Image (tube, grey):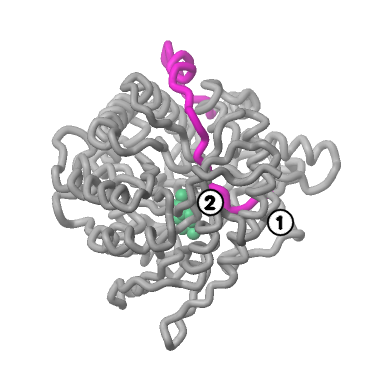
Protein backbone atom coordinates (compact mmCIF):
# COMPACT_ATOMS: atom_id res chain seq x y z
CA UNK A 1 0.00 0.00 0.00
CA UNK A 2 1.40 3.37 -1.02
CA UNK A 3 1.39 5.76 1.93
CA UNK A 4 1.38 9.49 2.48
CA UNK A 5 4.95 10.69 1.87
CA UNK A 6 7.11 12.23 4.58
CA UNK A 7 7.15 15.61 2.77
CA UNK A 8 3.37 15.82 2.64
CA UNK A 9 2.17 19.33 3.47
CA UNK A 10 -0.22 19.13 6.42
CA UNK A 11 -1.75 22.48 7.21
CA UNK A 12 -4.92 24.54 6.97
CA UNK A 13 -6.23 27.52 5.12
CA UNK A 14 -7.54 31.09 5.49
CA UNK A 15 -8.02 34.17 3.32
CA UNK A 16 -7.00 37.74 4.08
CA UNK A 17 -10.34 39.57 4.08
CA UNK A 18 -12.09 36.81 6.03
CA UNK A 19 -9.63 36.79 8.94
CA UNK A 20 -7.31 39.79 9.08
CA UNK A 21 -9.55 42.71 10.07
CA UNK A 22 -7.55 45.97 10.45
CA UNK A 23 -9.10 47.28 7.26
CA UNK A 24 -8.83 50.94 8.22
CA UNK A 25 -5.30 51.17 9.50
CA UNK A 26 -1.68 51.06 8.41
CA UNK A 27 -2.41 52.42 4.98
CA UNK A 28 -4.65 49.65 3.68
CA UNK A 29 -6.84 50.71 0.76
CA UNK A 30 -10.43 49.54 0.40
CA UNK A 31 -11.39 46.33 -1.34
CA UNK A 32 -14.87 45.48 -2.63
CA UNK A 33 -15.35 43.42 0.51
CA UNK A 34 -15.31 46.62 2.56
CA UNK A 35 -18.54 47.65 0.88
CA UNK A 36 -21.98 46.57 1.93
CA UNK A 37 -23.35 44.86 -1.14
CA UNK A 38 -26.98 43.71 -1.20
CA UNK A 39 -26.13 40.12 -0.37
CA UNK A 40 -23.82 41.19 2.39
CA UNK A 41 -26.49 42.47 4.77
CA UNK A 42 -25.11 42.38 8.28
CA UNK A 43 -21.92 40.69 7.19
CA UNK A 44 -19.00 42.71 8.43
CA UNK A 45 -15.45 42.00 7.35
CA UNK A 46 -13.93 45.08 8.97
CA UNK A 47 -12.69 43.30 12.06
CA UNK A 48 -13.04 39.67 11.04
CA UNK A 49 -10.91 37.52 13.39
CA UNK A 50 -8.31 40.21 14.16
CA UNK A 51 -5.63 37.97 12.70
CA UNK A 52 -3.67 41.12 11.77
CA UNK A 53 -3.18 41.72 15.49
CA UNK A 54 -3.02 38.08 16.60
CA UNK A 55 -0.91 36.55 13.85
CA UNK A 56 1.95 35.58 16.18
CA UNK A 57 -0.39 33.77 18.54
CA UNK A 58 -2.18 32.15 15.60
CA UNK A 59 1.04 30.89 14.04
CA UNK A 60 2.18 29.59 17.44
CA UNK A 61 -1.04 27.57 17.72
CA UNK A 62 -0.57 26.25 14.17
CA UNK A 63 2.93 25.18 15.14
CA UNK A 64 1.51 23.46 18.23
CA UNK A 65 -0.80 21.47 15.94
CA UNK A 66 2.30 20.48 13.98
CA UNK A 67 1.50 22.31 10.73
CA UNK A 68 3.99 21.75 7.94
CA UNK A 69 2.33 24.44 5.84
CA UNK A 70 -0.18 27.27 6.05
CA UNK A 71 -2.27 28.45 3.13
CA UNK A 72 -3.29 32.13 3.28
CA UNK A 73 -3.92 34.98 0.88
CA UNK A 74 -2.40 38.41 0.51
CA UNK A 75 -4.67 41.41 0.48
CA UNK A 76 -4.01 43.28 -2.77
CA UNK A 77 -5.20 46.61 -1.34
CA UNK A 78 -2.90 46.25 1.67
CA UNK A 79 0.09 46.11 -0.71
CA UNK A 80 -1.22 48.56 -3.32
CA UNK A 81 -3.97 50.64 -1.63
CA UNK A 82 -5.22 51.83 -5.02
CA UNK A 83 -4.56 48.50 -6.71
CA UNK A 84 -1.62 49.87 -8.66
CA UNK A 85 0.96 52.61 -8.33
CA UNK A 86 2.31 53.39 -4.90
CA UNK A 87 3.18 50.56 -2.56
CA UNK A 88 2.20 50.51 1.12
CA UNK A 89 5.28 49.61 3.13
CA UNK A 90 3.29 48.74 6.27
CA UNK A 91 1.37 46.15 4.28
CA UNK A 92 4.62 44.67 3.03
CA UNK A 93 5.92 44.64 6.60
CA UNK A 94 2.90 42.69 7.80
CA UNK A 95 3.38 39.88 5.28
CA UNK A 96 7.14 39.85 5.81
CA UNK A 97 6.52 39.43 9.53
CA UNK A 98 3.94 36.73 8.97
CA UNK A 99 6.24 34.82 6.61
CA UNK A 100 9.17 35.06 8.99
CA UNK A 101 7.03 33.93 11.88
CA UNK A 102 5.92 30.87 9.88
CA UNK A 103 9.46 30.02 8.85
CA UNK A 104 10.60 30.31 12.46
CA UNK A 105 8.45 27.21 13.09
CA UNK A 106 9.37 25.56 9.78
CA UNK A 107 5.88 26.10 8.42
CA UNK A 108 5.88 26.31 4.63
CA UNK A 109 3.87 29.29 3.35
CA UNK A 110 1.37 28.45 0.60
CA UNK A 111 0.25 31.80 -0.76
CA UNK A 112 -2.83 32.84 -2.73
CA UNK A 113 -2.28 36.03 -4.69
CA UNK A 114 -5.98 36.87 -5.07
CA UNK A 115 -8.86 35.66 -2.93
CA UNK A 116 -12.16 37.51 -3.61
CA UNK A 117 -10.89 41.00 -2.65
CA UNK A 118 -10.21 43.25 -5.64
CA UNK A 119 -9.17 46.80 -4.74
CA UNK A 120 -12.15 49.16 -4.80
CA UNK A 121 -10.33 51.78 -6.85
CA UNK A 122 -9.86 49.30 -9.68
CA UNK A 123 -13.41 48.04 -9.35
CA UNK A 124 -14.67 51.61 -9.70
CA UNK A 125 -12.85 51.84 -13.03
CA UNK A 126 -14.64 48.78 -14.40
CA UNK A 127 -12.79 46.00 -12.58
CA UNK A 128 -12.09 42.83 -14.55
CA UNK A 129 -14.24 44.03 -17.42
CA UNK A 130 -11.64 46.73 -18.03
CA UNK A 131 -9.08 44.35 -19.43
CA UNK A 132 -6.13 46.67 -19.96
CA UNK A 133 -6.41 48.21 -16.52
CA UNK A 134 -6.97 45.03 -14.56
CA UNK A 135 -4.64 42.65 -16.37
CA UNK A 136 -1.77 45.12 -16.13
CA UNK A 137 -2.51 45.85 -12.48
CA UNK A 138 -2.69 42.14 -11.65
CA UNK A 139 0.60 41.43 -13.38
CA UNK A 140 2.23 44.37 -11.60
CA UNK A 141 0.85 43.30 -8.21
CA UNK A 142 1.81 39.63 -8.65
CA UNK A 143 5.29 40.47 -9.92
CA UNK A 144 5.82 42.66 -6.87
CA UNK A 145 4.78 39.80 -4.60
CA UNK A 146 7.25 37.45 -6.31
CA UNK A 147 10.02 40.04 -5.89
CA UNK A 148 9.17 40.72 -2.26
CA UNK A 149 8.38 37.23 -1.02
CA UNK A 150 9.59 34.81 -3.70
CA UNK A 151 12.73 34.05 -1.72
CA UNK A 152 10.59 32.46 0.98
CA UNK A 153 7.38 31.30 -0.74
CA UNK A 154 7.68 28.14 -2.82
CA UNK A 155 3.99 27.47 -3.42
CA UNK A 156 1.89 30.11 -5.15
CA UNK A 157 -1.71 30.07 -6.26
CA UNK A 158 -2.89 32.74 -8.67
CA UNK A 159 -6.65 33.08 -8.18
CA UNK A 160 -8.86 31.48 -5.57
CA UNK A 161 -12.04 29.94 -6.97
CA UNK A 162 -11.94 31.65 -10.33
CA UNK A 163 -14.90 29.44 -11.30
CA UNK A 164 -16.99 30.50 -8.30
CA UNK A 165 -16.29 34.18 -9.07
CA UNK A 166 -17.89 33.61 -12.49
CA UNK A 167 -20.65 31.23 -11.40
CA UNK A 168 -21.72 32.70 -8.06
CA UNK A 169 -19.77 35.96 -7.78
CA UNK A 170 -22.99 37.66 -6.64
CA UNK A 171 -23.04 35.46 -3.51
CA UNK A 172 -19.41 36.15 -2.72
CA UNK A 173 -19.98 39.87 -3.20
CA UNK A 174 -17.70 40.42 -6.19
CA UNK A 175 -20.26 40.59 -9.01
CA UNK A 176 -23.34 42.79 -9.23
CA UNK A 177 -25.98 40.43 -10.68
CA UNK A 178 -28.23 43.30 -11.77
CA UNK A 179 -26.49 44.26 -15.00
CA UNK A 180 -27.54 44.16 -18.62
CA UNK A 181 -26.00 41.33 -20.62
CA UNK A 182 -24.71 39.81 -17.41
CA UNK A 183 -23.50 36.51 -18.88
CA UNK A 184 -21.75 38.13 -21.80
CA UNK A 185 -19.92 40.27 -19.27
CA UNK A 186 -19.17 37.36 -16.96
CA UNK A 187 -17.46 35.33 -19.65
CA UNK A 188 -15.47 38.37 -20.75
CA UNK A 189 -14.38 38.80 -17.13
CA UNK A 190 -13.52 35.11 -17.08
CA UNK A 191 -11.38 35.47 -20.19
CA UNK A 192 -9.62 38.56 -18.88
CA UNK A 193 -8.83 36.73 -15.65
CA UNK A 194 -7.53 33.69 -17.56
CA UNK A 195 -5.23 35.95 -19.56
CA UNK A 196 -4.02 37.69 -16.39
CA UNK A 197 -3.42 34.33 -14.73
CA UNK A 198 -1.46 32.97 -17.69
CA UNK A 199 0.69 36.10 -17.91
CA UNK A 200 1.47 35.93 -14.20
CA UNK A 201 2.25 32.22 -14.38
CA UNK A 202 4.66 32.84 -17.21
CA UNK A 203 6.19 35.80 -15.41
CA UNK A 204 6.83 33.62 -12.36
CA UNK A 205 8.50 30.99 -14.55
CA UNK A 206 10.63 33.63 -16.26
CA UNK A 207 11.84 34.87 -12.88
CA UNK A 208 13.45 31.47 -12.29
CA UNK A 209 12.39 30.82 -8.75
CA UNK A 210 12.53 27.31 -7.39
CA UNK A 211 8.84 27.23 -6.49
CA UNK A 212 5.66 26.21 -8.30
CA UNK A 213 2.54 28.11 -9.29
CA UNK A 214 -1.00 27.06 -10.15
CA UNK A 215 -4.68 28.02 -10.00
CA UNK A 216 -6.96 27.29 -7.03
CA UNK A 217 -10.46 26.63 -8.36
CA UNK A 218 -13.32 24.99 -6.50
CA UNK A 219 -13.48 21.59 -8.17
CA UNK A 220 -16.14 19.07 -7.39
CA UNK A 221 -17.40 16.26 -9.49
CA UNK A 222 -20.90 16.42 -10.96
CA UNK A 223 -22.84 13.13 -10.96
CA UNK A 224 -25.66 12.01 -13.23
CA UNK A 225 -28.91 11.42 -11.36
CA UNK A 226 -29.59 8.14 -13.20
CA UNK A 227 -27.92 5.80 -15.67
CA UNK A 228 -30.01 7.23 -18.52
CA UNK A 229 -27.61 8.25 -21.29
CA UNK A 230 -29.12 11.72 -21.45
CA UNK A 231 -28.45 12.23 -17.73
CA UNK A 232 -24.88 11.08 -18.19
CA UNK A 233 -24.57 13.54 -21.05
CA UNK A 234 -25.84 16.30 -18.74
CA UNK A 235 -23.27 15.39 -16.09
CA UNK A 236 -20.48 15.35 -18.68
CA UNK A 237 -21.48 18.83 -19.80
CA UNK A 238 -21.96 20.07 -16.26
CA UNK A 239 -18.41 19.00 -15.41
CA UNK A 240 -17.15 20.87 -18.47
CA UNK A 241 -19.13 23.97 -17.53
CA UNK A 242 -18.36 23.94 -13.80
CA UNK A 243 -14.85 22.51 -13.61
CA UNK A 244 -12.96 21.90 -16.85
CA UNK A 245 -13.53 25.27 -18.49
CA UNK A 246 -11.23 26.70 -15.83
CA UNK A 247 -8.71 23.90 -15.47
CA UNK A 248 -8.33 23.24 -19.21
CA UNK A 249 -7.33 26.87 -19.64
CA UNK A 250 -4.91 26.84 -16.68
CA UNK A 251 -3.36 23.40 -17.23
CA UNK A 252 -3.65 22.79 -20.98
CA UNK A 253 -3.74 26.39 -22.16
CA UNK A 254 -6.97 25.69 -24.05
CA UNK A 255 -10.63 26.54 -23.97
CA UNK A 256 -12.87 23.59 -23.16
CA UNK A 257 -14.82 22.91 -26.35
CA UNK A 258 -18.16 22.05 -24.70
CA UNK A 259 -18.09 25.22 -22.62
CA UNK A 260 -16.95 27.28 -25.61
CA UNK A 261 -19.73 25.98 -27.84
CA UNK A 262 -22.27 26.71 -25.13
CA UNK A 263 -21.00 30.28 -24.89
CA UNK A 264 -21.12 30.77 -28.65
CA UNK A 265 -24.62 29.29 -28.91
CA UNK A 266 -25.90 31.72 -26.31
CA UNK A 267 -23.93 34.75 -27.41
CA UNK A 268 -21.79 34.76 -24.27
CA UNK A 269 -18.42 34.11 -25.89
CA UNK A 270 -15.70 36.59 -24.95
CA UNK A 271 -13.88 38.84 -27.33
CA UNK A 272 -10.42 37.42 -27.95
CA UNK A 273 -7.50 39.55 -29.01
CA UNK A 274 -4.84 38.39 -31.38
CA UNK A 275 -2.29 36.30 -29.52
CA UNK A 276 -4.59 35.41 -26.61
CA UNK A 277 -4.54 31.66 -27.25
CA UNK A 278 -0.77 31.86 -27.43
CA UNK A 279 -0.72 33.60 -24.03
CA UNK A 280 -2.78 30.76 -22.53
CA UNK A 281 -0.44 28.17 -24.03
CA UNK A 282 2.65 29.88 -22.66
CA UNK A 283 1.37 30.30 -19.10
CA UNK A 284 0.48 26.79 -17.99
CA UNK A 285 0.33 25.79 -14.34
CA UNK A 286 2.81 23.55 -12.50
CA UNK A 287 0.25 22.06 -10.13
CA UNK A 288 -3.44 22.20 -9.27
CA UNK A 289 -4.49 23.66 -5.96
CA UNK A 290 -8.18 22.92 -5.50
CA UNK A 291 -10.96 23.44 -2.98
CA UNK A 292 -13.44 20.63 -2.43
CA UNK A 293 -16.55 20.67 -0.23
CA UNK A 294 -19.04 18.37 -1.96
CA UNK A 295 -20.37 17.06 -5.26
CA UNK A 296 -23.44 18.04 -7.19
CA UNK A 297 -25.90 16.02 -9.26
CA UNK A 298 -27.71 16.78 -12.50
CA UNK A 299 -30.18 15.38 -15.00
CA UNK A 300 -30.93 16.19 -18.63
CA UNK A 301 -31.92 19.79 -19.23
CA UNK A 302 -35.63 20.51 -19.51
CA UNK A 303 -35.38 24.27 -19.74
CA UNK A 304 -34.92 26.76 -22.52
CA UNK A 305 -34.28 30.46 -22.31
CA UNK A 306 -32.15 32.47 -19.96
CA UNK A 307 -30.37 31.38 -16.81
CA UNK A 308 -32.09 32.12 -13.53
CA UNK A 309 -29.97 32.44 -10.41
CA UNK A 310 -31.51 30.55 -7.55
CA UNK A 311 -30.80 31.13 -3.90
CA UNK A 312 -27.51 29.53 -4.69
CA UNK A 313 -24.10 29.67 -3.09
CA UNK A 314 -20.72 28.17 -3.93
CA UNK A 315 -21.96 24.63 -3.57
CA UNK A 316 -25.52 24.72 -4.79
CA UNK A 317 -25.42 26.48 -8.21
CA UNK A 318 -28.40 26.57 -10.63
CA UNK A 319 -29.78 25.04 -13.85
CA UNK A 320 -28.16 25.84 -17.18
CA UNK A 321 -30.80 25.64 -19.94
CA UNK A 322 -29.57 23.39 -22.71
CA UNK A 323 -26.89 21.77 -20.54
CA UNK A 324 -28.34 20.40 -17.31
CA UNK A 325 -30.96 20.64 -14.57
CA UNK A 326 -29.59 20.48 -11.08
CA UNK A 327 -31.10 17.97 -8.65
CA UNK A 328 -30.85 16.97 -5.06
CA UNK A 329 -28.78 13.88 -4.26
CA UNK A 330 -30.88 12.03 -1.70
CA UNK A 331 -28.03 9.59 -1.02
CA UNK A 332 -25.97 12.19 0.76
CA UNK A 333 -26.37 13.73 4.22
CA UNK A 334 -26.19 17.50 4.57
CA UNK A 335 -24.46 19.96 6.88
CA UNK A 336 -26.44 22.40 9.03
CA UNK A 337 -25.92 24.89 6.21
CA UNK A 338 -27.34 22.61 3.51
CA UNK A 339 -24.12 21.49 1.84
CA UNK A 340 -24.10 17.77 1.09
CA UNK A 341 -21.33 15.65 2.55
CA UNK A 342 -19.61 13.33 0.10
CA UNK A 343 -16.14 12.04 1.01
CA UNK A 344 -16.18 9.52 -1.84
CA UNK A 345 -16.91 12.38 -4.20
CA UNK A 346 -13.58 13.82 -3.05
CA UNK A 347 -11.89 10.70 -4.45
CA UNK A 348 -13.88 10.88 -7.71
CA UNK A 349 -12.88 14.52 -8.04
CA UNK A 350 -9.18 13.80 -7.54
CA UNK A 351 -9.29 10.86 -9.96
CA UNK A 352 -10.98 12.99 -12.61
CA UNK A 353 -8.36 15.73 -12.34
CA UNK A 354 -5.49 13.24 -12.31
CA UNK A 355 -6.85 11.40 -15.37
CA UNK A 356 -7.24 14.65 -17.23
CA UNK A 357 -4.12 16.61 -16.34
CA UNK A 358 -1.58 14.34 -14.61
CA UNK A 359 -0.43 17.22 -12.42
CA UNK A 360 0.34 17.26 -8.70
CA UNK A 361 -2.75 18.11 -6.66
CA UNK A 362 -2.84 20.15 -3.49
CA UNK A 363 -6.01 20.41 -1.41
CA UNK A 364 -6.32 24.07 -0.44
CA UNK A 365 -9.81 23.90 1.12
CA UNK A 366 -12.10 21.22 2.51
CA UNK A 367 -14.12 21.45 5.68
CA UNK A 368 -17.37 21.71 7.56
CA UNK A 369 -19.17 24.92 8.50
CA UNK A 370 -21.21 24.52 11.68
CA UNK A 371 -22.69 26.32 14.68
CA UNK A 372 -20.10 25.42 17.31
CA UNK A 373 -21.13 25.39 20.95
CA UNK A 374 -18.77 26.67 23.61
CA UNK A 375 -19.34 24.71 26.84
CA UNK A 376 -19.21 26.36 30.25
CA UNK A 377 -15.64 25.22 30.78
CA UNK A 378 -14.66 26.69 27.40
CA UNK A 379 -14.32 23.37 25.56
CA UNK A 380 -15.80 22.88 22.09
CA UNK A 381 -16.79 19.35 21.14
CA UNK A 382 -16.80 19.53 17.34
CA UNK A 383 -16.91 15.80 16.66
CA UNK A 384 -18.91 16.48 13.45
CA UNK A 385 -15.89 18.37 12.06
CA UNK A 386 -13.54 15.55 13.03
CA UNK A 387 -15.87 13.02 11.36
CA UNK A 388 -16.03 15.09 8.18
CA UNK A 389 -12.27 15.59 7.85
CA UNK A 390 -11.50 12.03 8.85
CA UNK A 391 -13.81 10.63 6.17
CA UNK A 392 -12.18 12.85 3.55
CA UNK A 393 -8.68 11.89 4.65
CA UNK A 394 -9.58 8.22 4.30
CA UNK A 395 -10.41 8.91 0.66
CA UNK A 396 -7.26 10.97 0.21
CA UNK A 397 -5.30 7.91 1.32
CA UNK A 398 -7.09 5.81 -1.28
CA UNK A 399 -6.14 8.38 -3.93
CA UNK A 400 -2.48 8.30 -2.91
CA UNK A 401 -2.51 4.53 -2.89
CA UNK A 402 -3.85 4.59 -6.44
CA UNK A 403 -0.84 6.65 -7.46
CA UNK A 404 -2.43 10.09 -7.56
CA UNK A 405 0.18 12.68 -6.65
CA UNK A 406 -1.45 14.61 -3.79
CA UNK A 407 1.11 16.88 -2.16
CA UNK A 408 -0.79 18.61 0.62
CA UNK A 409 -4.00 18.99 2.58
CA UNK A 410 -5.28 22.33 3.93
CA UNK A 411 -8.74 22.18 5.44
CA UNK A 412 -10.79 25.34 5.71
CA UNK A 413 -10.03 26.86 8.11
CA UNK A 414 -7.07 27.18 10.45
CA UNK A 415 -8.87 29.65 12.71
CA UNK A 416 -12.52 30.68 12.84
CA UNK A 417 -13.19 33.42 10.32
CA UNK A 418 -16.06 35.18 8.60
CA UNK A 419 -17.90 33.07 6.02
CA UNK A 420 -18.28 34.51 2.52
CA UNK A 421 -21.94 35.32 3.12
CA UNK A 422 -23.08 33.83 6.42
CA UNK A 423 -21.07 35.63 9.06
CA UNK A 424 -18.83 34.10 11.70
CA UNK A 425 -21.66 32.01 13.11
CA UNK A 426 -20.78 29.51 10.39
CA UNK A 427 -17.52 28.31 11.88
CA UNK A 428 -14.86 26.13 10.28
CA UNK A 429 -11.72 26.51 12.40
CA UNK A 430 -9.62 24.19 14.53
CA UNK A 431 -8.98 27.29 16.63
CA UNK A 432 -12.00 29.07 18.05
CA UNK A 433 -12.07 32.87 17.97
CA UNK A 434 -14.28 34.47 20.58
CA UNK A 435 -16.30 36.99 18.58
CA UNK A 436 -19.85 36.89 17.23
CA UNK A 437 -21.67 38.57 14.38
CA UNK A 438 -22.75 41.44 16.63
CA UNK A 439 -19.13 42.24 17.35
CA UNK A 440 -19.40 40.91 20.93
CA UNK A 441 -16.34 39.09 22.24
CA UNK A 442 -12.65 39.59 22.92
CA UNK A 443 -11.10 37.63 20.01
CA UNK A 444 -9.54 35.20 22.47
CA UNK A 445 -8.25 32.02 20.83
CA UNK A 446 -9.02 28.53 22.15
CA UNK A 447 -8.52 24.96 21.04
CA UNK A 448 -11.49 22.89 19.81
CA UNK A 449 -11.54 19.09 20.08
CA UNK A 450 -10.63 19.01 16.38
CA UNK A 451 -7.43 20.89 17.23
CA UNK A 452 -6.14 17.98 19.35
CA UNK A 453 -7.38 15.41 16.86
CA UNK A 454 -5.67 17.08 13.87
CA UNK A 455 -2.46 17.40 15.88
CA UNK A 456 -2.49 13.63 16.34
CA UNK A 457 -3.22 13.05 12.66
CA UNK A 458 -0.27 15.20 11.63
CA UNK A 459 2.10 13.69 14.19
CA UNK A 460 1.35 10.21 12.80
CA UNK A 461 1.54 11.46 9.18
CA UNK A 462 -2.09 10.46 8.71
CA UNK A 463 -1.68 6.92 10.06
CA UNK A 464 -3.89 7.47 13.09
CA UNK A 465 -7.16 9.02 12.00
C1 LIG B 1 -14.86 28.79 -0.50
C2 LIG B 1 -14.05 30.05 -0.37
C3 LIG B 1 -13.68 30.44 0.99
C4 LIG B 1 -14.61 29.98 2.09
C5 LIG B 1 -15.25 28.65 1.86
C6 LIG B 1 -16.41 28.34 2.77
O1 LIG B 1 -15.73 28.90 -1.57
O2 LIG B 1 -12.86 29.96 -1.13
O3 LIG B 1 -13.36 31.80 1.01
O4 LIG B 1 -15.34 30.93 2.69
O5 LIG B 1 -15.69 28.47 0.54
O6 LIG B 1 -17.55 29.00 2.27
P1 LIG B 1 -18.54 29.83 3.15
O7 LIG B 1 -17.69 30.87 3.82
O8 LIG B 1 -19.50 30.47 2.22
O9 LIG B 1 -19.16 28.89 4.08
Mark 1 and mark 2 in contact? Answer it, CB < 8 Å. no
Q: Does the magenta stretch include residue 288?
A: yes
Q: Nearer the viewer, residue 234 or 101?
A: 101
Query: The residue tagged with tag 1: helix, strand or loop?
Result: loop
Left or right: residue 228 versus residue 461 is: right
Residue drawn at the location 62% of the way across and 66% of the way down: 387
Residue 272 lies in quadrant = top left
Residue 464 lies in quadrant = bottom right
Confirm if mark 2 falls within 8 A of ligand 1. Answer: yes
Return the residue at label 1: 328
Residue 420 lies in quadrant = bottom left
Question: Where is 181 relative to 200, above or below?
Answer: below
Return the residue at label 2: 314
* Spatial separation of the CA atoms under disc 1 and disc 2: 15 Å
Q: Residue 204 location in percent, x, y?
A: 35, 25
Q: What stretch is highlighted in magenta?
A: 268-296
| Residue positioned most to the top | 274
Amino acid sequence: MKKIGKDFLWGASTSAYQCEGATNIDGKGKSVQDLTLPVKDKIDFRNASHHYFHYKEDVKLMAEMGFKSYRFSISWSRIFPKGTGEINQKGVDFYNNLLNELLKYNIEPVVTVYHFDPPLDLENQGGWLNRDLMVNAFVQYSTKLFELFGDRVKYWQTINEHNMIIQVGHVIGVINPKQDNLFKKLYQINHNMLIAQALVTRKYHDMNFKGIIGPAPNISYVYAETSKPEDFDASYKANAWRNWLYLDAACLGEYNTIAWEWMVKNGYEPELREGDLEILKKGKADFIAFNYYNTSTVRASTKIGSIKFSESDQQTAYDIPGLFDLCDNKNLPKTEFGWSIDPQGFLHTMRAMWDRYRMPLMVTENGLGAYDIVEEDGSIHDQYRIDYIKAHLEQLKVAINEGIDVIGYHPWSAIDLVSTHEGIKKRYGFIHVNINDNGEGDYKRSRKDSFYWYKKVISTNGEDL
